[in-house]
Image (cartoon, rainbow, N blue to C red):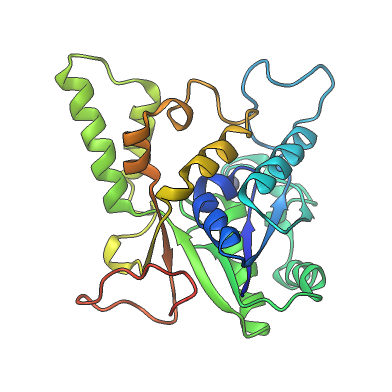
Amino acid sequence: MATVVFFHAHPDDEALATGGTMALMAEAGHRVILVVATRGEEGEPVEGVLETGEKLEDRRSSEVEKSAEILGVARIEFLGYRDSGMAESDTTSHPNCFWQATKEEAVNRLSNLLKSEEVDLIVVYDPNGGYGHPDHIQVHQVGTQWAQENSVRLRWVTLNRDAIRKVVEQAINEATGAGEELDEDLAKREERSSEESFGMAEKDITHAIDVKTALDRKRAAVAVHASQIAPDSFFVTLGEDQYKKAFGREWFVDPETPRTTEEPLRSDLLLN
Ligand SMILES: [Zn+2]
């Protein structure tokens, strides 16, 4: 059995990006460890969710703990940095934020957390962090450095740009075909997924993990992040078939062993 570390930036990333793969690996008997760089202080809370005086970071910490339990995580740790917020905001210059940490210092913290573990594989984001968030980019850089120093195999979780564009296009066609106006959610998704820096092209992706049998757990884990994901968000309301189509596979890259055009996508994250 393997020990696999999923290194994420904020509470909710684990469920949205890799929840299915984590659940399946835990179910198969692997030791799944979740390391979260920040407590998501800069997230935007869903209106009315926080109690008076309740801090967002406390709520999000308990949400990610619940999510980890649902996904079968054996151990969860926080790296102890502050959420850096979006690229253009002032919060990226806060002295305790993850973006301001030197790579060496952050790698040291990660090494200390993991020194008692025999890690076989670590999962970080792709070089652009999926969509350019500073903390996601930092996870990529710190995790990559740690993997190199410790000779641990590396995977990047990414978004399949081609597949997402197809799903968004279909949803738009359905909405406009029915004479509906595009809702804000969908318009935002279209805008984001059309950027060239969004995720990766399918030809550059090496692994597609079919997580359909773990979608119940992925969905439940996403839903406990109620401070971030409104009950009317498509993550919660999407019908089962649509959900399968949109989230039934999670996408990874083995940066050491690219896939040739003839080779099908690999279905086991541990296989090179
Ligand atoms: Zn994030």
Q: Nearer the viewer, residue 224 or 100?
A: 224
How far across and down, in percent of the image, does residue 40 sit?
A: 69, 41
Residue at 72% across / 59% down in the picture? 74
How far across and down, in percent of the image, does residue 104 sit?
A: 74, 73
Quadrant the C terminus occupies:
bottom left
How far across and down, in percent of the image, does residue 29 sit?
A: 61, 65
Residue at 57% across / 42% down in the picture? 88
Q: Can residue 127 be seen in this snapshot?
A: no
Name the outermost residue toward the right.
53
Report whether 21 appears left or right of 240.
right
Residue 245 occupies quadrant: top left
Q: Nearer the viewer, residue 87 or 185?
A: 185
Quadrant the N terminus occupies:
bottom right
- Total labels: the figure holds 0
How far across and down, in percent of the image, does residue 45 sit?
A: 65, 26
Residue 189 occupies quadrant: top left
Residue at 55% across / 62% down in the picture? 25
Q: Can residue 256 be seen in this snapshot?
A: yes
In the displayed structure, 227 sits above or below 20; it is above
In the displayed structure, 209 sits above or below 119; it is above
Name the outermost residue toward the left.
177
Report whether 96 appears left or right of 45.
right
Residue 90 occupies quadrant: top right
Q: Nearer the viewer, residue 270 or 107?
A: 270
Report whether 17 appears left or right of 197.
right
